[in-house]
Amino acid sequence: MSSHREAPEIAKDPVADSSDLYAFVSPDKPDTVTLIANYVPLQLPSGGPNFFEFGDDVRYEIHIDNDGDGRADVTYRFEFTTEITNPNSFLYNTGPIDSLDSRNWNRRQFYSLTRVADGREHRLAHKLPCPPCNVGPLSTPKYAELVRQATFTLSTGERVFAGQRADGFFVDLGAIFDLGTLRPFQQLHVAGKKIFKAEGEPVNATDRMNVHSIAVQVPLKHVRRRANRYGAADPASVIGVWTSASRRQVRVLGDRVAGDTSTGPFTQVSRLGNPLFNEVIVPMSKKDLWNSLPPSEDKRFAQFVEQPELAALLPALYPDVFPNLDKLTKAKKARADLVAILLTGVPAGLIDGFTNATGDVQADMLRLNTAIRPTRRPDRFGVLGGDLAGYPNGRRVGDDVVSIALRAIAGVTVPLVDKAFRPDAAAAAVTPGLSAADVTAPFLANFPYLGTPYDGFNNPSAAAA
């Protein structure tokens, strides 16, 4: 999956697990950029009596690099606190929750938001309320109204939301991790013969599951570089974005009255830039290390981008289907196309009218050219589909990042850096066979864009799965 349970240690700590990251110029407000980071993945809708929430002991951050060094120049930091209204009740709510200050709601969560820029912290908001989880039609009868109440526009221009949303990621997980099975791809005819017969239709493994999202819509003036070191105006429009979660270094287990305490400096336990990077690029033995490092250290992992394991697996799994990819892989030639897409950005001159390069520092970040305006008719294949406003130029909620990544690894993007290379006919057809249409909760046209979370009453099958 994009980054759901992608490393051994963070799989044991879902509250701090960053599962998806989105960064795009807001289609309904193109003078802003929207940044969405999801955590607490794979939530079954029926989560009572202890419903899902952010961690009070976790520091959640969205980072922006605007000078290409792989280090944060602007950070939006979210920190949460939880309050219990009735300590003598086991219930999450004792009646319908019709407002964020409802007396019926027993376990409320709040957050503070801090912007860190130029080494200085600026508290933008304190004790903003999250909405409750979407319990069901009796408990949360007007959930969209609760979300509206929990969406805030700050005096500094940012718009923010933190709370439960429907997971918008789509992937046929059961097939892909069953030795790389791609069900619809295997029904195709390539060079006059069927590749392989696979039974069944692709299934979206994350459908009808929820996540917890932190979302911030930021005026472009707050994320772009304002001036260069000589004091002159700098029109640079490309930013790099990643998200992280950190915990205190020491946790002391207490008794039932005192509870646990955490102390010491914060240490990073999770991060995410490009979807699938730690999932399918970084080897198992280094996944936990990768989660602990900043993007500026990602040159340590460049060899796994230059020679991705999956590029060698595809010809082995599908004999005679990827002969050109097989030759390229066996030649041990570094994949400069993947390095550009994932670690440095695409330089000018490779794709007409497009660049999102940030320089020579190799760092896994979502790179977004904020000067490229949203398109009215997005193509789910992003840049590969001729839509320069989509992945890998940032990432929109509807972008088919799994298919895009698979096709790039299969060799579709090699001609950008090697005109003599001819991609295999099957490379442009690789797909798990899913799209945004396979997400039951539709995406929203406006902030916070991810769909209404599934409630447990109307989604009992997900809880029983």
Image (spheres, grey):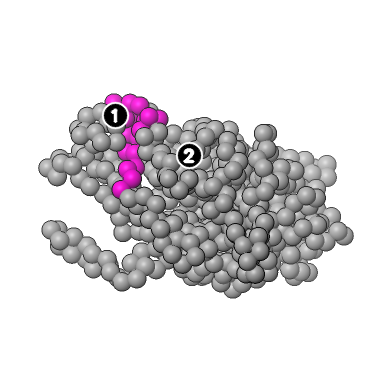
Picture quadrant of residue 194: top right
What residue is pinned by disc 1? 98
| Residue at (18, 60) in percent of width and height | 259
Please tell me which residue is depicted at 46% across the width and 67% down the height of the picture. Answer: 119
Q: How many marks?
A: 2
Q: Which residue is mark 2?
A: 448
Query: Of callouts 2 and 1, which one flags the residue occurring earlier in the amino acid sequence?
Result: 1
- Left or right, 34 with respect to 188, comes to left
User: Is residue 118 among the parts visible in the rendering?
Assistant: yes
Q: Give the residues drawn in magenta, as a range.
A: 127-146
Rendering coords of residue 23 (x, y %): 56, 49
Q: Amino acid at mark 2?
A: Pro
Q: Amino acid at mark 1?
A: Asp
Q: Is residue 330 above or below residue 22?
A: below
For numbered disc 1, what is the local secondary structure? loop
Relative image position of residue 78 (x, y in whole percent): 39, 54
SS assignment at label 2: loop
